[in-house]
Image (cartoon, rainbow, N blue to C red):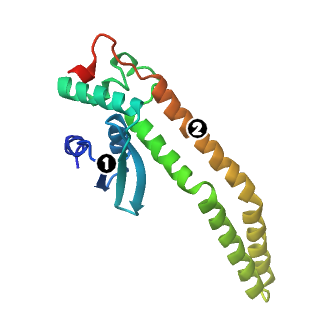
């Protein structure tokens, strides 16, 4: 689905679902600019993004500007990624912000639980393997060392994930801080 087809689906409906084959970050960025927030991600290789209409004042204002820019020059991103910022090295593109919003959404839904669960299951499997491999000391010791390592890195892994989450929040914040709307025109009057 191209961006024009997706924008046409953002018609004010309370809930919009879209099947995605790519990473979906640009669709998340577009949805956000047109007044929707990512509510759910379903699936695996091909997945479905579910958006909910955001009725807050800020979301309505974003949607009005995005609609204005889209109808005026086809550039829905002009309000969130103004032309004078596009060539600066530390500017955040809408796609980068969309990727960060997906990462924040996943963290908000799951936290560090999936990673800790994988490490715990891996550690337990290695311990069980060490028990079954007791007749081969080198194998048993290797599996025991693996189990200890997996259990030991569990707290560090949680910290790494929290650090990555904070980096994604910073990307979203930088993106929001670069937002600029001209003051000479009210898009809601258009």
Instruction: State the image coordinates of residue 21 (x, y, percent, origin top left).
Output: 31, 56
Instruction: Mark 2 vs mark 1: give the one in front.
Output: 1
Q: From the image, tell me which residue sits under label 2.
A: 167
Q: Residue at x 36, y 48 (%)?
A: 52
The image quadrant of residue 46 is bottom left
Mark 1 lies on a secondary structure that is loop
Measure how far apart labels 2 and 1 are at the Cα level.
30 Å
Local SS, label 2: helix
Number of other residues with Cα within 10 Å of mark 2, as a class: few under 14, some 14 to 19, many 20 or more: some
Quadrant in which the C terminus appears: top left
x and y percentages locating residue 83 in the rendered image: 33, 19
Left or right: 115, with 59 as reference point: right
Is residue 145 placed above or below 54 in the rendered structure? Answer: below
Q: Is residue 179 left or right of residue 154?
A: left
Residue at 56% over, 57% down: 110
* Residue 79 lies in quadrant: top left
Residue 90 at least partly seen: no
Q: Which residue is mark 1?
A: 14
Q: Along the horizontal axis of the image, is 104 left or right of 112?
A: left
Closer-to-camera residue (81/68) = 68
Q: Hey, which quadrant is residue 92 in on the image? A: top left
User: How many dots with numbers?
Assistant: 2
Q: Residue furthest top?
A: 184
- The front one of 91 and 37 is 37
Work out whether mark 2 precedes mark 1 in sequence or the reverse, and give the earlier one. Answer: 1
- Residue 39 visible? The answer is yes
Residue drawn where x is 45% and y is 25% of the image: 91
């Amino acid at each position: 689905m191209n961006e024009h087809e997706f924008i046409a689906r953002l018609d004010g409906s309370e809930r919009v679902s879209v099947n995605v084959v790519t990473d979906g970050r640009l669709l998340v960025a577009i949805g956000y600019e047109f007044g929707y927030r990512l509510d759910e991600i379903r699936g695996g290789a091909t997945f479905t993004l579910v958006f909910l209409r955001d009725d807050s004042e800020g979301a309505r204002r974003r949607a009005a500007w995005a609609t204005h820019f889209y109808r005026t020059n086809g550039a829905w991103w002009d309000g969130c990624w103004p032309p004078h910022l596009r060539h600066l090295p530390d500017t955040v593109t809408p796609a980068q912000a969309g990727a960060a919003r997906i990462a924040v959404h996943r963290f908000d839904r799951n936290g560090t639980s999936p990673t800790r669960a994988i490490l715990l299951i891996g550690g337990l499997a290695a311990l069980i393997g060490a028990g079954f491999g007791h007749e081969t000391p080198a194998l048993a010791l290797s599996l025991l060392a693996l189990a200890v390592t997996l259990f030991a890195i569990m707290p560090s892994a949680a910290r790494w994930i929290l650090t990555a989450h904070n980096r994604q929040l910073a990307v979203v914040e930088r993106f929001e801080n670069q937002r600029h709307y001209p003051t000479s025109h009210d898009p809601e009057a258009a």
